[in-house]
Image (cartoon, rainbow, N blue to C red):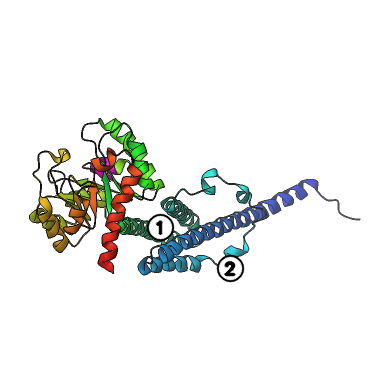
Amino acid sequence: MSKSIDTTSLNEISNRVVVMVEPHSQKAQTQQVVYRILDANLDRAREGLRIIEEWCRFGLNNGQLVGECKYLRQDLAQWHTAELRAARDTPGDPGTELSHPQEEQRSNMKALLQANFSRIQEAMRVLEEYGKLYHPNMGKAFKQMRYRVYTLETSLMGYQRHQLLWRSQLYLVTSPAETLLKTVEAALKGGLTLVQYRDKTADDIVRVEQAIKLRRLCHSYGALFIINDRVDLALAVDADGVHLGQQDMPITMARELLGHQRLIGKSTTNAEEMQKAIADGADYIGVGPVYETPTKADKPAAGLQYVSYAAKNSSIPWFAIGGIDASNINDVIEAGAERVAVVRAIIQAEQPTLITQYFLSQLHRIKTIANS
């Protein structure tokens, strides 16, 4: 006779098999998901770094920054194992169909670089967290790499600002005007690459609003945007730097707050002030006022003699400033100036684009003669 099978015993055996198999199956599935996450973010970080590296190589011609990008990519590649690549499932990834309008356009090079730095940093953070489930050292390794990316971003953005500062020959310092944005944009169209927002009387809420609009405008044209006097405002609106007067915050203190990636300028009226500003770490200086000007009514003119002194003794970029206009710019150039800053000559001009182009043409002409 065949033995009858106890239904209760079969159910017990079945339940035990499920308990034994299901956890293992779930663990394997979770592992594959982690592998896919790591693979996708390793790709994302490596692609972003390559985009940054190409600009450092061809746009900035900076071997040091190119080298750091390469080292980071090589360190990433060491973690991109065949095991992780094998888990890739591009056809089954719903993320490949997703996009955002902001990803489809870049307004300028700074926006492109910042978008890719954000992409890399986000990917690094994902790799740091999920990597802890893959390898005991992966989380720590990617934490350190993420900090290296932050340093790379600071170095690159700072280098770009300094490079553009050295190339800039005309500096517009604004004064309050009803058509300020329109006038600044007209000057930017004429080739202006450096703008300082200066308003001594407006309330802070107005200054912040105006500064944000000007910063966006300047960056859309690839120009530097500087805030007069106020370090806090420069940080609040993400300006490229701050310009300090002799009675403002010391350069060393401003540097601690702004870091080395942002620019710090200093007004100087004589040789002693110039040498101190350079020693304190200013990125550029204002030299003047060359002529008497209502913008600096309390300061006597420093004259062309100080311009000649700066031409011979300044080791950093400097801008002759104070009462300079179309009628006297050539005198200032002949005294040794290769860069000038103006206020009323552009802000009050009927045709800001044309006057900007005129100033730049005179400055370029002298620079071309000097280099020939």
SS assignment at label 1: helix
Question: Comparing marks 1 and 2, which lies closer to the viewer?
Answer: 1
Q: Which mark is residue 340?
A: none
Look at the image and tell me whether residue 220 can be seen.
Answer: yes
Query: Which comes sooner in the sequence, label 1 or label 2?
Result: 2
Residue visible at 14% across and 63% down in the picture: 312
Residue visible at 37% across and 69% down in the picture: 63
Looking at the image, do the residues carrying marks 1 and 2 touch, with CB atoms under 8 Å apart?
A: no
The quadrant of the image that shows the C terminus is bottom left
Look at the image and tell me whether residue 256 can be seen.
Answer: no
Mark-to-mark CA distance, 1 and 2: 23 Å
In this rendering, the answer to whether 249 lies above or below 283 is: above
Viewer-closest of 304 and 253: 304
Percent across and percent down for residue 283 are 23, 56
Give the magenta range.
226-234
Q: How many numbered marks are there?
A: 2
Percent across and percent down for residue 52 are 44, 60
Provide the residue designation for mark 2: 82
SS assignment at label 2: helix
Percent across and percent down for residue 271 are 9, 56
Disc 2 packing (10 Å; few <14; some 14–19; many ≥20): few
Viewer-closest of 143 and 289: 289
Residue visible at 24% across and 31% down in the picture: 202
Residue type pointed to by label 2? Ala
The quadrant of the image that shows the N terminus is bottom right
**Horizontal arrangement in the rendering, residue 164 relative to residue 135 (left or right):** left
**Horizontal arrangement in the rendering, residue 28 relative to residue 178 (left or right):** right
Provide the residue designation for mark 1: 146
- Membership of 349 in magenta stretch: no
**Horizontal arrangement in the rendering, residue 33 relative to residue 117 (left or right):** right
Residue type pointed to by label 1? Arg
Residue visible at 39% across and 69% down in the picture: 67
